[in-house]
Image (cartoon, rainbow, N blue to C red):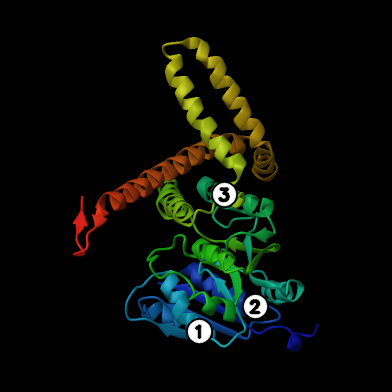
Amino acid sequence: MSVSEQPSVSIIVPTARADDNLRWCLSSIVAAHPASDELLVLVDGGDPEACALAAQFGARVMPTALRSGPAAARNAAAQLVTGAILFFVDSDVVIPPDAVARVRQAFVDYPDAAAIFGSYDDAPAAPNFFSQYKNLLHHYVHQQGCEEASTFWAGCGAIRADAFRAVNGFDAGYRIPSMEDIELGYRLRASGRRIRLVKSLQVKHLKHWTAGSLIRADFLARALPWSRLILSSGVLINDLNVTIRSRVCAVLVYGLLLALGLAIRWPVLLWLAAVQVAALLVLNADLYRFFLRKRGFWFTLAVIPWHWFYYFYGALAFAIAWTQHNLRRLSRLGARPTGRPTSAGGLQP
């Protein structure tokens, strides 16, 4: 199929500030071949340096007076572009030269797909441990995910403009980078539309992660709101970060902590702890082999406790969300009036 017969693509990049990440992101976009039909950079909050930087790369620039968050920013940008495909790219990723071609071709190959998304590559830019661990874990999880996807990812994700508008875009209630893309994916699937994970579409993540930023993002911006979304929607998928295997591992981590705690009093329980350690290693063997191939033995050894800690706080977030969800249900039940209506319209106990 010739380029003229393929769907038009508008790239949308939301950003709040000018930095080297934005510069590298835009450099990769203008270097794409073939190019997109349109590039719009929405500057959330109107930072003049970010506007000037985007203009240097020939982008159409849309500044906003107030900071509203990436969900609202993407929605606003989507109203201004003309492409049949809205290709969302985060301002801290570098796309490969063939990214636009892969997006176009994906919608040709999967004509019934409303949206497609990719993943981070296996060569993160920041060299420190937490950046390598976090981004390689994301890459592995997405590469192991179901191609018939149950959700969406806006770091490198594209959606048909008519489908995006039909479901009213992202939920602007997410004021910080969080679950707005996953929530959109849930609504797309609930409306009967299909989403495709294109594993060959990979971008380089430039973000520098620290222990603190990783835990805050994973727990507050991902695990807690995702748990609330699962409970409110009643949909618990078996894919990506919420597979059955992940749930079993979370139970094993808590079982391990309990066994170690009780072993202070009853040392025989160290055998139970050893069994749970072995089970965790076996269940995650493929992942740890992946880290071993990519970064070696000592890196993998350092990954294991952090990965188990990830299961710990992920399960903790779900427990908190479950408790809050059920307390709200009980509160609503308690607020309902009791008794039966009388002929005068009141309630008779």
Residue 62 screen position, x and y as percent: 43, 84
> What residue is rendered at 50% in x and 84% in y?
56
**What's the residue type where badge 3 is placed?**
Asn
> What residue is rendered at 37% in x and 81% in y?
64
In this rendering, the label closer to the viewer, 1 or 3 = 3
Say which mark, if any, is on residue 56: 1
Q: Is residue 155 visible?
A: no
Residue 291 screen position, x and y as percent: 65, 42
Residue closer to the observer: 225 or 301: 225
Report, in whole angstroms, how far the alpha carbon at label 2 lies from the one at label 1. Answer: 14 Å
Query: Earlier along the polypeptide chain: callout 2 or callout 1?
Result: 2
Say which mark, if any, is on residue 31: 2
Tell me the SS state at disc 2.
loop
Residue bearing the label numbered 3 = 241
Query: Earlier along the polypeptide chain: callout 1 or callout 3?
Result: 1
In this rendering, the label closer to the viewer, 3 or 2 = 3
Q: Badge 1: few (under 14), some or many (20 or more) residues near its Cα, within 10 Å?
A: few
Q: Quadrant of residue 86?
A: bottom right
